[in-house]
Image (cartoon, coloured by chain):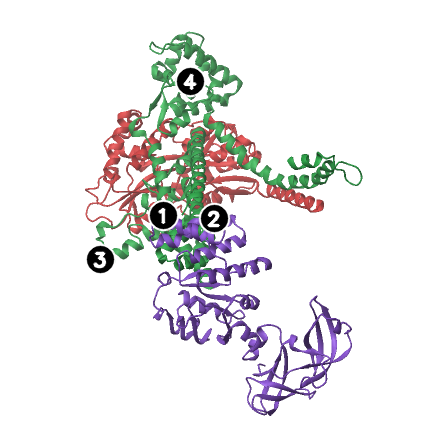
Chain colours: A green, B red, C purple
């Protein structure tokens, strides 16, 4: 802009045919801009349909509670009027009866769906709603309280009515609370779930721990391998590269089974150790179907994700840097630490972030080799997606994972950026 | 350029059309020997069209995705008891006209020809299967395990135990092992104290447990000596004994029987053919026929009579009745799983079980 | 200026990478204190290998290298205290210019204030005082080059090695840097071992030039000697422009010979330098500027008829290609004076030269 104005001040520049230069320039650029737009369009659409929309949908589902509010609008209105200390009033029973019978006429399925949803908050709602829906037809007018208690004695217990309190709003943070072992009470106060049902915090912690250990283990293993890859003569490094990439070409399941054969208690490693007399047969190491198994197998599977970025950075570091550092008086160790390693930081950072992000969402490997204490949060997401159909909870956990990754990425950008400015 | 695009579109349209023509009915099941038995007993004997079997790992996630997005490609699905109920409640399955299904040879309508009441109008009968303990001959010297209590008794029968990574059947077994009468199991389970009691029994084997999550695993675990005893799907043990001559011994005590149903997905693309297939597959003759290939018990009671008369019924000339999980001889000491209870309390018990496993 | 006592001595050095071929064949070379010695040669001639052996990055297969009379074969590179400027400068990209310069001082555990002082002095020397906080990537090629030189000098080494340090610069900058490096060398009294394949660079800067070919030093001498009095055909050909005539010695007069040119087109009277007696093959070497066009008959012993094939006007002289004695690539540089202005392509003229200017050397081919 500044340039064109500067040009414009002594008098508008014109092209040969008299149009202003600026107009002419824009016209000539329009075609190429249009073409660029057309090229960008397919990936853009791809991105929108396969990333933006599903992720948006996931975010919405994680806070959406409209279904149950659509089924029980008057019930929730009456619920708000109830003082919660006395027994539920007849008006609440009547409202519930009206809501259910009305919904049954409009869309029978909504009742079933609402029951499944309500069951997440208090186990038993599903069958209670189902039984009631079937028998409400026979109820003859008010009073509804006695009739409903007749149908199922649970209607006489206050706790069922109180549990409605956690569902009474169209938007809820309940799924997020569930994902960290908390829940709403009837007044929407946040409380902890029972001690023996606390699952998720432990899994979050374990997921972070496993991802962290796997990342570090990958780094420790990958760094020397990458160095060899980058410095060996071509014919050796090609062979080594094939070895590194071999796991990529092998089916995930085959690799996992191979590890099972190696590491289980009657497996190759234990048999060898016992055979050599290093271990008693009673003290065979538990390296499979637990935390160790998950860490070992995930490290092997994710190793290439660490090696490749580090290798690609090391490949660009000429050997003359190490020579220069030694020539200037640094011992080989010091030269490596002060001159070589700092230059590999971008590769190390990229590798770590890649491995960590992949590890944090892993679930197939932990499912197969994790046994009792090697399963991760990803397994719970899959479980709620496929088994319980509690997609709200799955979405909430997915959202937390996504947030964790974004925070991590931001931190990486921040830290490595700062490092680049000060390193040395 | 445009010609290329047109040709590509045309080609993909033709490809899509030919797929639709090829597969008359898409039946989704669990794969392996089980799908093979369905293929032989139902699909090969059906003259109404071709059947295209698809494998899945259970759960309603995929079905819900198909129904909610309006792009249903599955017709018939083989489902577990909880899914049979939740899926029907959620409207993922079609409610079926019961009058089109064939009665038993003696005239009993199909819905009355079952061991349990029909849970809803979405489902039609398939098989019974069970979680049951087993070990390999020669594992224990002296007394052999004969009761479910023995499975939870590490002192009497030392060695590791293989158990699965979800709570179904384990809660029931733990309570029966702890002395709860089989008839009272679900009443006890419906109280917080009952669940506590079950977990207290599970605690006894926890430190000696290897957890499995895929059906082939327990056989490998027992065969390799990794565990002394394991729970497994009865069909897997039977197949190893009947077809591969393995020396596995099943402890027919305290097993937990589970239903398996067939359902029609709502909005199924080949609805008419699929209905015809379901009528064929649920007939007594086909139900009995399946037992020629696998030792899961037919859900229709009338099929049992056919099998018993036809012994040796298994395709390789062996007797099959003694491997049937729901044969009368073992029913007295079997828990018939209550899917209604599991549909209500399954999530909550699962959470507790997961927490218990990880602690 | 070169001192009597050598600072560096290569004694019987041999080097092989693969055990089959020698890259350096029996090298003996002394470098005097304060000398600027250039190793010049085509690529693959062994010059860079010699430099790497001196720096300690390649072990000698045989022989010993002495620095200040100390054998250094077993001394690790970081203990040799030799400064070095690398071909691509090898400035550490993650450090600022000042940090790069401070690095050798930091590893020598100098105090911070002394580090700063020396860094500032070094930066001032290469006129980059304002650039201490920049990163190498933010500097131009010439500036990076100066930083590399400054870094190699900042810890006061006696000896500085330079491995084609100007190769990446454009022509003007290269010439300017040649003078700068030369001045630094003179001002600081350094000993420099310089590797290049650019002969004009070598001629400009060096006290002595060691011409390498095929793992052997062909000749080691000051620039003017190398140009005026090459010992053999390779050096004659490699340094400066050169006309070659091949023939057989027919008469040996002690310090001069008569040589019959191969196609019987004449006999040349030449200076006997590096040739056996009568009957042996020889290469005659003659600089283009030592040939006279249209000489007075009798003024020079060698006069031949030449056919002008091509004239290129180059301002101060006209470069002319003649056919002489059957060779059609005989170059003569004719000074741009009125006397020779009439020469045209296709014309036939006489050319001639002195015995002293025509050197009879070894038969290279």
Which residue is identified by label 3? A277
As drawn, A161 above or below B236:
above
Q: Callout 4 environment at 10 Å: few (<14), some (14 to 19), or many (20+)?
A: some
Q: Going from the N terminus, do you reach mark 2 or mark 1 first?
A: 1
Looking at the rendered image, the disc whose residue lies closer to the viewer, 3 or 1, is 1
Q: Secondary structure at mark 1?
A: helix
Which residue is identified by label 1? C113
Q: CA distance from mark 4 to mark 3?
A: 67 Å
Task: Inspect this view and state whether residue A305 appears.
Answer: no
Q: Is residue C322 left or right of residue A170?
A: right
Classify the position of the N terminus of chain A by image quarter.
top right
- Quarter of the image for residue A231 reads bottom left
* x and y, in percent, of residue C356 in the image: 60, 82
Looking at the rendered image, the disc whose residue lies closer to the viewer, 1 or 4, is 1
Which residue is identified by label 4? A132
As drawn, C255 above or below C346:
below
Task: Inspect this view and state whether residue A32 appears.
Answer: yes
* Circle 1 chain: C
* x and y, in percent, of residue A134 in the image: 44, 19
Q: Nearer the viewer, residue A14 or A110?
A: A14
Q: Secondary structure at mark 4?
A: helix
- Quarter of the image for residue A208 reads top left
* Circle 4 chain: A
Q: Secondary structure at mark 3?
A: loop
């Amino acid at each position: 802009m500044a340039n064109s104005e500067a040009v414009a001040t002594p008098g508008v520049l014109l092209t040969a045919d008299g149009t202003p230069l600026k107009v002419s320039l824009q016209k000539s650029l329009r075609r190429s801009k249009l073409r660029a737009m057309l090229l960008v369009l397919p990936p853009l659409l791809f991105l929108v349909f396969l990333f933006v929309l599903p992720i948006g949908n996931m975010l919405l589902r994680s806070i959406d509670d409209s279904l149950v509010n659509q089924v029980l609008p008057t019930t929730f209105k009456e619920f708000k009027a109830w003082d919660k200390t006395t027994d539920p009033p007849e008006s609440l029973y009547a409202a519930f009866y009206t809501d259910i019978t009305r919904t049954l006429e409009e869309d029978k399925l909504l009742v079933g769906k609402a029951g499944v949803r309500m069951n997440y908050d208090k186990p038993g709602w599903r069958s209670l709603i189902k039984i009631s829906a079937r028998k409400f037809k026979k109820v003859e007018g008010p009073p509804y309280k006695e009739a409903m208690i007749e149908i199922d004695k649970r209607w006489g217990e206050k706790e069922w009515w109180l549990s409605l309190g956690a569902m009474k709003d169209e938007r809820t943070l309940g799924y997020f609370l569930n994902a960290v072992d908390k829940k709403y009470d009837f007044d929407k106060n946040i409380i902890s779930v029972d001690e023996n049902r606390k699952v998720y915090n432990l899994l979050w912690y374990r997921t972070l721990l496993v991802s962290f250990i796997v990342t570090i283990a990958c780094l420790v293993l990958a760094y020397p391998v990458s160095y060899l890859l980058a410095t060996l003569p071509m014919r050796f490094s090609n062979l080594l590269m094939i070895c590194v990439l071999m796991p990529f070409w092998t089916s995930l399941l085959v690799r996992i089974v191979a590890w099972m054969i190696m590491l289980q208690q009657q497996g190759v490693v234990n048999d060898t150790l016992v055979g050599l007399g290093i271990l008693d047969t009673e003290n065979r190491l538990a390296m499979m179907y637990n935390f160790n198994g998950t860490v070992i197998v995930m490290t092997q599977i994710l190793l290439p994700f660490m090696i490749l970025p580090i290798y690609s950075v090391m490949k660009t570091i000429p050997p003359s840097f190490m020579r220069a550092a030694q020539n200037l008086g640094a011992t080989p160790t010091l030269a490596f630490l002060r001159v070589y390693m700092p230059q590999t930081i971008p590769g190390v950072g990229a590798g770590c972030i890649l491995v960590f992000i992949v590890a944090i969402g892993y679930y197939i490997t932990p499912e197969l080799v994790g046994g009792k204490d090697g399963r991760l949060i990803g397994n719970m997401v899959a479980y709620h997606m496929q088994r319980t159909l509690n997609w709200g909870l799955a979405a909430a956990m997915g959202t937390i994972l996504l947030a964790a990754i974004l925070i991590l990425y931001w931190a990486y950008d921040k830290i490595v950026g700062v490092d680049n400015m000060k390193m040395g | 350029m445009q010609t290329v695009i047109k040709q590509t579109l045309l080609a993909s349209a033709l490809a899509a059309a030919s797929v639709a023509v090829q597969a008359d009915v898409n039946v989704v099941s669990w794969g392996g020997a089980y799908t093979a038995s369905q293929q032989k007993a139902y699909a090969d004997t059906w003259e109404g069209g071709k059947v295209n079997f698809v494998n899945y790992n259970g759960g309603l996630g995929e079905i819900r995705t198909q129904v909610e997005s309006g792009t249903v490609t599955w017709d018939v699905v083989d489902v577990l008891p909880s899914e049979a109920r939740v899926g029907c409640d959620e409207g993922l399955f079609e409610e079926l006209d019961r009058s089109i299904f064939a009665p038993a040879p003696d005239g009993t309508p199909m819905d009355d020809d079952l061991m349990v009441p029909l849970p809803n109008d979405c489902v039609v009968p398939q098989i019974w299967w069970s979680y049951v303990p087993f070990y390999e001959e020669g594992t224990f010297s002296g007394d052999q395990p004969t009761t479910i209590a023995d499975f939870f008794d590490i002192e009497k029968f030392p060695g590791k135990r293989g158990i699965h990574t979800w709570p179904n059947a384990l809660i029931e077994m733990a309570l029966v092992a702890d002395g709860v009468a089989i008839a009272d199991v679900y009443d006890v389970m419906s109280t917080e104290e009952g669940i506590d009691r079950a977990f207290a029994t599970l605690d006894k084997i926890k430190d000696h447990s290897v957890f499995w999550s895929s059906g082939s695993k327990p056989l490998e675990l027992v065969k390799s000596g990794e565990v002394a005893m394991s729970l497994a799907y009865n069909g897997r043990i039977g197949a190893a004994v009947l077809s591969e001559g393995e020396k596995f011994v099943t402890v027919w005590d305290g097993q937990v029987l589970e239903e398996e149903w067939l359902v029609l997905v709502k909005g199924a693309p080949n609805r008419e053919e699929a209905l015809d297939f379901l009528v064929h597959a649920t007939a007594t003759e086909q139900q009995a026929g399946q037992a020629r290939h696998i030792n899961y018990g037919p859900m229709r009671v009338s099929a049992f009579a056919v099998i018993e008369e036809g012994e040796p019924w298994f395709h390789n000339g062996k007797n099959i009745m003694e491997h049937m999980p729901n044969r009368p001889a073992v029913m007295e000491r079997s828990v018939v799983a209550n899917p209604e209870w599991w549909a209500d309390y399954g999530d909550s018990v699962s959470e507790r079980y997961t927490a218990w496993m990880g602690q | 200026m070169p001192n009597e006592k050598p600072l560096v001595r290569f004694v019987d050095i041999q080097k092989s990478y693969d055990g089959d071929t020698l890259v350096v064949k029996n090298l003996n070379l002394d470098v005097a204190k304060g000398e600027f010695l250039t190793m010049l040669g085509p690529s693959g001639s062994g010059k860079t290998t010699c430099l790497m052996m001196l720096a300690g990055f390649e072990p000698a297969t045989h022989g010993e290298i002495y620095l200040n009379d100390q054998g250094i074969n077993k001394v690790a590179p970081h203990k040799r205290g030799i400064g070095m400027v690398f071909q691509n400068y090898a400035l550490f990209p993650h450090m600022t210019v000042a940090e790069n310069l401070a690095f050798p001082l930091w590893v020598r555990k100098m105090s911070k204030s002394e580090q700063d002082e020396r860094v500032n002095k070094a930066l001032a020397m290469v006129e980059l005082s304002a650039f201490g906080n920049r990163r190498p990537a933010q500097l131009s090629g010439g500036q990076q080059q100066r930083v590399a030189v400054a870094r190699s000098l900042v810890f006061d080494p006696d000896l500085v090695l330079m491995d084609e340090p100007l190769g990446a610069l454009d022509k003007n900058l290269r010439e300017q840097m040649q003078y700068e490096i030369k001045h630094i060398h003179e001002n600081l009294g350094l000993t420099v071992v310089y590797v290049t394949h650019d002969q004009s660079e070598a001629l400009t800067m060096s006290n002595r030039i060691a011409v390498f070919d095929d793992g052997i030093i062909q000749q080691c001498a000051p620039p003017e000697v190398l140009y005026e009095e090459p010992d053999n055909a390779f050096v004659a050909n490699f340094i400066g422009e050169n006309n070659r005539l091949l023939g057989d010695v027919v008469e040996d007069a002690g310090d001069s010979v008569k040589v019959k040119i191969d196609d019987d087109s004449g006999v040349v009277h030449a200076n006997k330098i590096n040739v056996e007696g009568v009957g042996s093959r020889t290469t005659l070497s003659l600089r283009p500027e030592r040939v006279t066009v249209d000489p007075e008959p009798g003024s020079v012993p060698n006069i031949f008829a030449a056919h002008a094939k091509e004239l290129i006007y180059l301002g101060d002289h006209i470069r002319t290609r003649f056919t002489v004695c059957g060779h059609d690539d005989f170059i003569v540089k004719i000074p741009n004076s009125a006397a020779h202005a009439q020469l045209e392509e296709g014309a036939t003229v006489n050319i001639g030269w002195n015995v002293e200017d025509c050197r009879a050397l070894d038969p290279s081919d």
